[in-house]
Image (cartoon, coloured by chain):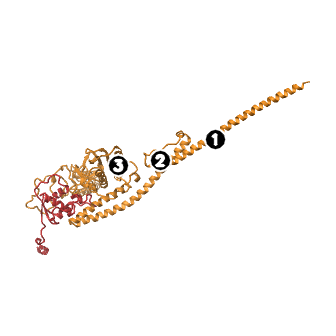
Amino acid sequence: MTRRPAGRPLVPAYLSTGGVARPSRPHLERLSVLARTEEPPPLGLPAAELALLDTLAGGSLAVVEAAALLRLPVSAVRVLAADLVDRDLVLARAPIPPAERFDPDLLKRVADGLRALKHHA
Amino acid sequence: MMELPDLVAGGLAAGTLSALALGGGLLRLRRQQTRQRAEIAALRTQLEGSVRAFTAEVEHLADRRVPAAARQVAHPHVAEPGPLQPLTTGTPLGIALENVVLALQSEVAAQRTRVDAAAQAGMRGATREIQAALYRLQDALRGLQQRYDDPELAQTLFRLDHENEQSLRRAQVTAVVCGAWVGLAREESHLVDAVTGGQARLAGYHRVQVHNHLETGTALVSHAVEPVAIIVAELLDNALRHSAPDTDVVVSLEHVHHGVCVTIDDAGLGMTRDERDRAQRLVAGDDLILLTDLGDPPRMGLAAIGRLTRQFDLGVDVSSASPYGGVRAVLRVDSHLLSRLDPADRPPAASAPRTTRKAAADRPAPSHAYGTESGVPEAAPGHHEPSDTDGLPQRRRRSPAAAPEESPAPRPAHSPAPSPARRPEEAAAALGALQSGTAAARAAAENAGADGHGDTPADRTGETDHTHHTDHTDIEGEAAR
């Protein structure tokens, strides 16, 4: 993981979006998954949007993860992502609904079972 | 016998003669007296005239010359009227009066400096507290920004953060002009971050275009970060204020022979020769800064730049005209204030403009993600520009720790100013080399002491030499770092 600089950041978050905090599309959430499309980025794309594209170069990420990597608040990343979605540079998918997640109890029981097996062996 | 008449005649003649002589003397005396009286009268009128002239001269001194001389201390262009009688110059009176004026001027100048120093101390104390309070407010606002992402609230928080940055800038600049420390310790940072950070402190930051032509990883040593951000903010503020609101201010960052130059061009009206000379004097920081000289409302920006250039050995030039018609301001950062950061380890801020240079070697693409979507290939074809640039957050691949006997890894060719943060592997290798070198030397010394001719002296000395050599070069390498 990259080292987080100590102390206050030199560049405030509002600069990344030019002071805009209202995304052009409202449906992006913290856990919406962003993925890069094959569209090449046009010239003159703002630096922060290029940075967001770069974080997606290795695969898809949730909005909140991209925000952590870019050291920006989620509100700023939502604006950047919405703009990139508008430019067809990024695909956004709705967050995975909670119903499809695994039951933590079940996972715990499987883990316990595996541990018991290991002890037997 | 003598005749009586003869006697009488002789006596008479003598009397007449003496009377004549007496009369002549008396007459002369009287004439002399009148002459002297006239002389005295003349002298008296002359004295009266002199006293009148002297009084007039002193009155003139009090009424005209003293106020003008006092004013001249603050405003050198005020002419000091000379003496009323030009003839007195050079006479003892003239010299004495001149000395009165000079003594007055030096005392007024001393008082002025003292009063200004007191005012600066007061301002310094107040602004330092305001600055600290604004930093606390900034922390609170940024905490809120991280926690809440409702667009309306986020919009308000962004606006408040920007307002806060502007207030902070004013408080900080005032404190710096009054001789305070910049008020914030920063760690080593990318130069482009310092410039972008300075840009963010201004109301018109939208109009600023930053072109970054630096090598990736060009950074500032920690104590130069905040001064550079302040200077860039003030130069940009000047440029924004003196150009039309529909024009851009262009900033370019470039390497020069002995450092880096930040060039700020505006398309405004430019400055007259007098203004330019004054600005150049202020930013050079050679003159004593007095608050009373800065005007009302005080123009702090250039004075703050002057203080900082002097303290931190930075160079600012505002004497040339911009090809866009306005002013060209150049900040020069010499190489002793520069360092290098590994962009993989400490990437620049997301909003900082990318460098236009191509990276020396393409690094493997970072992978923070869980896995690729079926529709999205691992490395998007045609996605060249961002992967060429180097400002990506990347994982660093750890190579297996180097064996201590190995000579230290050669520094990569593309890093002339090596990163001061030593990698753990390097530190381990250096310490290991030191330890094994010491141990080998001890063993050799002990063996040499135990038996005069060792079993395999050639082997051992060879080994010791080798270890020592490694150790030595490693330490040299560290010292150069």
The one nearer the camera, B228 or B438, is B228
> In the rendered structure, which amino acid carries the disc numbered 3?
Val
Instruction: Indicate left or right for B322 with B289 as reference.
Output: left
Colour of chain A as rendered: red
Q: Position of residue B440 (x, y in %)?
A: 25, 55
Among numbered discs 3 and 2, the one appearing first in the sequence: 2
Q: Which image quadrant is residue B77 in?
A: top left
* Circle 1 Cα neighbour tier, 10 Å, few/some/many (<14 / 14–19 / ≥20): few
- Number of disc labels: 3
Mark 3 neighbour class, 10 Å CA radius: few under 14, some 14 to 19, many 20 or more: many
Instruction: Mark 1 or mark 3: name the one nearer the start of the chain.
Output: 1
Q: Mark 2 belongs to which subunit?
A: B
- The vertical placement of B368 against B40, above or below, is below
Residue B444 place in picture, x, y as percent: 26, 54
Q: Which residue in the protein does label 1 denote?
A: B44
- State how far apart marks 3 and 2 are (Cα): 29 Å
Chain B pictured colour: orange
Judged from this view, the residue extending furthest toward the right is B1
Chain that bears disc 3:
B
Q: Mark 3 highlights which residue?
A: B283
The secondary structure type at the circle numbered 1 is: helix
